[in-house]
Amino acid sequence: MTTSGTYNFNPSLGEVVIYAYNLCEVRGTALAQEHMEAARMASNMLLSNWSNRGVNLWAVDLQQVTFTQTPTILTVTGNGSTATLTYATPNTPVYTVGNQITVSGTSVVDGTWTVTDSKNGSVSFASGYVGSTTGGTISSQTPAGTYSVDPSTVVILDAYVTTTQSNAQPIDRIILPVSRTEYASYPNKQQTGFPTVFWFDRLNDSSRSTGSPGPQVTLWPVPDGTSSQYLKYYRVRQIQDSAFTNGQTVEIPYLWLEAYAYALAHRLSVIWKPEKAMILKQLADDAYNVAAEQNVEQAQQYISPQIQGYFR
């Protein structure tokens, strides 16, 4: 028996859309521009839904944050009372209001300043400078406790702090997540030491909500700059946008193609073929469940009770 010997089946979004319409009993010759625009919107809405459903293993990656970093200044602007510096994100410091930073290499606002405002990718301080320029770096005597997070991040899964001493092998120590309420209960949020917990603040990026600083991860205790050097975390990111341009494919693995096609067909049937919606809904749910069963890590899991004394 002769087989193809290849593993390259990866249809473009356009091909999957035509197949989805066929499942709705809408033939390819009947498709118009409005059909394709509805399909593009339905595809991206579907991927948004899948990002919400759980951990998509193909969208998990490892991020690294360096505690002792000196961000390069992109712009310097001043209005005579306040100077604002911008720098690249993500995984860069969000400086604490009231703490001091040192600016160098700008020739206009070099020196040590007290932070008056800070958010992802920008920091402000009182200054008489008027104008705009570029270049320079920012540094601080101690690391920041908060860092910008890529706005495509859905959730942080596991986080650990890395210590590297001289030429020794790096040592990783897991840190645990806490809620907003628990972080708020800490009396001294600027306490320094080896970080043991993190709080992921899932704020909108400024591109989606004007004035929002964007998602951030805050460590406690605040890194002291000596006992640890890096924060590393696994995150689930948003699935990439789907578009018809240049035969683009959808960012899903082979094992999810059927689930995607049936789910897209169901969404399109609601618009173009309502009488088929119930049938396609069942097929879409069945295909999703089959794919989701394989979207797990094959590892042993142990559950044991935590038994300890309790005294009032």
Image (cartoon, rainbow, N blue to C red):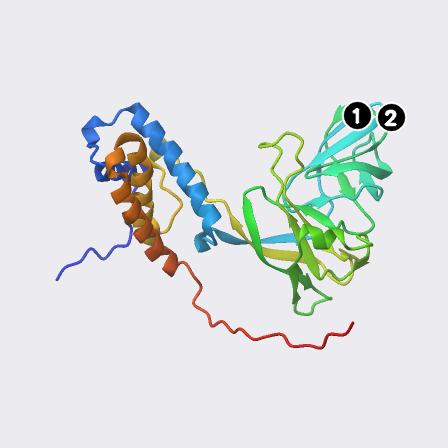
The answer to which of marks 2 and 1 sits earlier in the sequence is 1
Which residue bears the numbered disc 1?
78
Query: Residue 162, labelled with which disc?
Result: none
To which quarter of the image does residue 117 belong?
A: top right
The amino acid sitting under disc 1 is: Gly
Q: Nearer the viewer, residue 305 or 221?
A: 305
What's the residue at 74%, 45% (across, down)? Answer: 70
Q: Please, which residue is most extreme toward the front here?
A: 312
Give how far across and how far down residue 151 sits, in percent.
58, 41
The amino acid sitting under disc 2 is: Gly
Which residue bears the numbered disc 2?
128
Distance between the Cα atoms at labels 2 and 1?
7 Å
Q: Quadrant of the N terminus?
A: bottom left
Circle 2 residues within 10 Å: few <14, some 14–19, many ≥20: some
Q: Quadrant of the C terminus?
A: bottom right
Query: Compared to 147, does 30 lie above or below?
Result: above
Query: Compared to 183, does 83 lie above or below?
Result: above
Is residue 12 at all visible to an observer of this figure? no
Are dots 2 and 1 in contact, CB under 8 Å?
Answer: yes
